Image (cartoon, grey):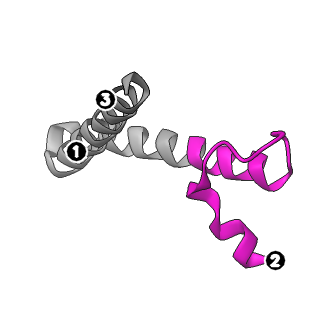
Amino acid sequence: MVFQRSNDRAQAGHLCRLLLLAVALTVKPLRWWGLMGSVVLLSVFTTYVGLIWWNVFDRVPCNCAGFIEAMG
């Protein structure tokens, strides 16, 4: 049960980061920071998917990159 609560907090934190990026992209003085945050977020995700694709992990850490199997 504790793991489930921890997972819920992590998801809520991720949602808050995404919402902050969305707000930063819409507010003109914060647009540059929103762009940089988006670039970092996409770079981290792309690196993560690439590491899974190259079988760096013993097992797939999560199934969110499951679309890779459908590609090849």
Residue 65 percent across, percent down from the top left? 62, 58
Task: Give the residue type that dot 2 points to.
Answer: Gly
What residue is disc 1 on?
A: 19
- For the stretch drawn in magenta, the main secondary structure is helix
In front here: 65 or 8? 8
Q: The residue tagged with tag 1: helix, strand or loop?
A: helix
Q: Closer to the observer: label 3 or label 2?
A: 3
- Magenta highlight on residue 20: no
Whether label 1 touches label 2, CB < 8 Å: no
Describe residue 70's horizontal placement relative to residue 6 as left or right. Answer: right
Alpha carbon separation for disc pair 1 and 2:
33 Å
Whether label 3 touches label 1, CB < 8 Å: no
Residue, far front: 1
**Which of disc 2 and disc 1 is earlier in sequence?**
1
Image quarter in which the C terminus is found: bottom right
What residue is disc 3 on?
A: 9
Describe residue 22's horizontal placement relative to residue 8 as left or right. Answer: left
- Magenta highlight on residue 56: yes
What range is drawn magenta here?
44-72
**Which of disc 2 and disc 3 is earlier in sequence?**
3
Alpha carbon separation for disc pair 3 and 2:
34 Å
Residue 24 percent across, percent down from the top left? 22, 42
The quarter of the displayed image where residue 34 is located: top left
Describe residue 54's horizontal placement relative to residue 40 as left or right. Answer: right
The residue positioned 56% from the left and 56% from the top of the image is 64
Q: The residue tagged with tag 2: helix, strand or loop?
A: loop
What residue is disc 2 on?
A: 72
